[in-house]
Amino acid sequence: MPEKRKKYDREFREGAVRIVEETGKPIAQIARDLGVNEGTLGNWVARAKEAREGRDGLSQDDVEELKRLRAENAELRMERDVLKRSVVLWVKEATK
């Protein structure tokens, strides 16, 4: 006999996700309290998180590349500053 699926309206799903995010309680506990399957609630939370992160038009790959590029940029700035200091010291030594 096929299993009958429950349908949840958008307001219920959004409310359940908000409860998870605001209370910080485990998804499993909130799912039990609401009578929803744990995996279902987990999917709702994951989709909400993806939607929030995707609002600014960046995919997860873009976000990861941005983090990598920012770290690389910081390293290159540090190397540049070290070279500048080295040149200053070299000029001071050469003009003595």
Image (tube, rainbow, N blue to C red):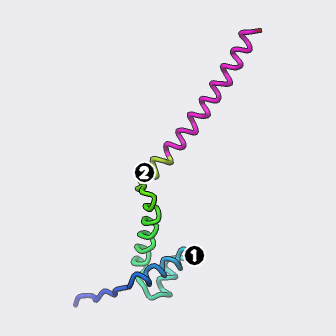
Residue furthest out toward the right: 96
Count of numbered marks:
2
Q: Above or below — where is 75 with respect to 24?
A: above
Disc 2 secondary structure class = helix
Q: Above or below — where is 95 with respect to 5?
A: above
Label of residue 22 in the image: 1
* Location of residue 37 (image quadrant): bottom left
Q: Main secondary structure of the magenta part?
A: helix
Q: Is residue 26 magenta?
A: no
Q: Position of residue 31 (x, y in %)?
A: 47, 83
Q: Amino acid at mark 1?
A: Glu
Q: Above or below — where is 26 with respect to 70?
A: below
Q: Position of residue 3 (x, y in %)?
A: 27, 88
Residue furthest out toward the left: 1
**Where is the C terminus found, in terms of image quarters?**
top right
Q: Amino acid at mark 2?
A: Asp
**The magenta segment:** 68-95
For label 2, the residue is 62
Near-viewer residue (38 or 88): 88
